Image (tube, rainbow, N blue to C red):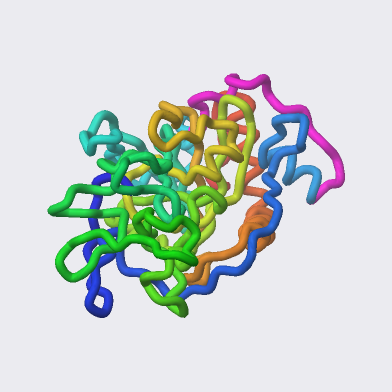
Amino acid sequence: MRRQVVHAILPGFLCAAGFAQSAQISGNVPFVDLQSIDSPVGWNAWLTIQSEGASKDTPEPGVIEGRANSCASESAMLLDAVAWDRVGQPFYEVPLWRFPNSRAFFFVSGMTIDADGAPNAYNSDDTGLDELANAGTPARWNGIITDQNGNPLIQREGDPFPGYYISCTSLSDRTKKFTDPTGYVDASKIPYVVLPQDVADRWGARLGDFAVVMNLRTGKSSFAIYADIGTLGEGSVALADALGIRSDARRGGEHDGILYLFFPGSGNLQPRTIGEIQSEGEKLLLHRSGRMKRLSACMDNGSPSGSSEF
């Protein structure tokens, strides 16, 4: 999470990353993204393979760069949302689009890397996955668990990374103690996405909902879960790895060319395993295969097809 704080009081403690939802985290499952192993196929070809049993040529990497917004005349524009850089300053506006007669919405932006939820995200020596400054300040921590006095809680023996702070995500497993570092969505293992609270509230996205994210430069795609409240155009370390983006939370990320497609109401307010994210994402895409294909075709051709609806 970057500089956007949603305060919530837990029994006697504070996790400034946001109020945790009821959840249960299961064991890890080997990750499989949408693309073929050796070819940047993306969801267009994946949908074709799944629904028709045939493959389809993919545009050269970079050809579809920027086409999602130009094709969005086939859908309804929602709003111009502001994306923030790593120090919380607005630097460009991102149009959000929604499919007609659907709650699904999408936008194209860059990606900053979120390490929140990883047990080795932050420590007092600032040698964790991410810069300690990105977890806030002593007066206002926003990515780590604190005590009643605002002091960061430190992992103990038996925890994944003794001596490190307990890093939290807005989505968490409330069957576990909030001081348990394994109760949060681990950015280093789970592909997750981030949304500002106002965007999520306005368009019905809830923590635990599913998304599909595509690197338009390479065609690499990944299913993901909405797990943290923060800024527009932000994803976990594991999501960046799946998309072929430099996943260093300190210096990684991508300036543009990342397409995010959200499915509001698709989750159950719980964290999921990678296998569950994969299987649920596949169901969502197959259910909307016609619309996804028309969006992909529009991006492939570089112009709207003229259809009024997806």
Q: Main secondary structure of the magenta part?
A: loop
> At 47% from the left edge and 64% from the top edge, which residue is drawn?
159
Please say if 283 is above or below 191: below
Start and end of the magenta stretch?
A: 51-68
Query: Vertically, is 9 above or below 36?
Result: below
The percent position of residue 132, horizontal first and vertical second, equals 29, 43
Q: Would residue 6 be seen by someone viewing this image from the given angle? A: yes
Q: Where residue 306 sits in the image (x, y, percent)?
A: 56, 34
Is 221 in front, or is 88? Answer: 88
Q: Give whichever of 252, 290 is nearer the camera.
A: 252
Q: Residue at x 52, y 56 (%)?
A: 225
Residue 46 in the magenta stretch? The answer is: no
Q: Is residue 58 magenta?
A: yes
Residue in the picture at 55% in, 45% down? 238
- Going by the image, does 238 lie left or right of 165? right
Residue shown at 30% from the left, 56% from the top: 197
Residue 208's x, y, as percent? 48, 64
Q: Position of residue 150 (x, y in %)?
A: 17, 62
Q: Nearer the viewer, residue 74 or 154?
A: 154
Q: Residue furthest front?
A: 157
Q: In the figure, residue 133 lies in which quadrant?
A: top left
Asked whether residue 287 is in view, the answer is: no
Give residue 81's quadrant in the image: top left
